[in-house]
Image (cartoon, rainbow, N blue to C red):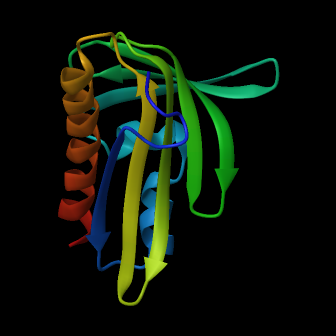
Amino acid sequence: MTDSSHDRVTRMIRLSAPPEDVWRAIGDFDGVAGWHPAFVAAEPTEIDGERYRRLTTTEGEQYFDRLIETGPLRYAYETAEGPLALSDFRATLACVAEKGGCHVFWSARFEPPEGQEREADEVVGALFEIGLAALADRFQ
């Protein structure tokens, strides 16, 4: 069992673009398919007053995420259903201003299947890295 007070996987990138410009591109919870190359569709829905999205990957896999928190230049979500055998998946996407640009942070905590910790960390990390690389291409 992991310590739930710390993220298992964290990736970040520094961009020379203003944080407001970057957040305009990535800050829409339902708009991830517009900037992340691993996703071809994001279908928003509302259930009992809560925001969800169904993401479809280029491989046809689907994730069903629930928005759990928003703030200035950040949001957090949990995955209710997905192709990975992970439980208690919660992630945060955030953009932090700094002199001359910003940092984009994407982090997650989750419980991988026993014995598959390394593989799970690598898969989640790769998904984050693909998205952040696309941002680097777009804003550098």
Q: Which residue is drawn at 22% across and 46% down?
A: 129
- Where does the C terminus fall, quadrant-wise? bottom left
- Where does the N terminus fall, quadrant-wise? top left
Q: In which quarter of the image is residue 119?
A: top left
Q: Residue at x 29, y 73 (%)?
A: 15
Q: Quadrant of residue 2?
A: top left
Query: Which residue occupies the extreme right position in the image?
Result: 49
Query: Which residue occupies the extreme bottom position in the image?
Result: 99
Q: Which residue is drawn at 29% across and 22% down?
A: 57
- Marks counted in the figure total 0
Q: Judge whether 116 appears above or below 101 on screen.
A: above
Residue 104 position, x and y percent, is 38, 62
Q: Residue at x 44, y 42 (%)?
A: 7
Q: In this view, does 41 lie to the left or right of 64?
A: left
Q: Judge whether 130 appears above or below 96 on screen.
A: above
Residue 83 position, x and y percent, is 34, 10
Name the one closer to the observer, 65 or 115.
115
Residue 107 position, x and y percent, is 41, 45
Residue 42 position, x and y percent, is 45, 28
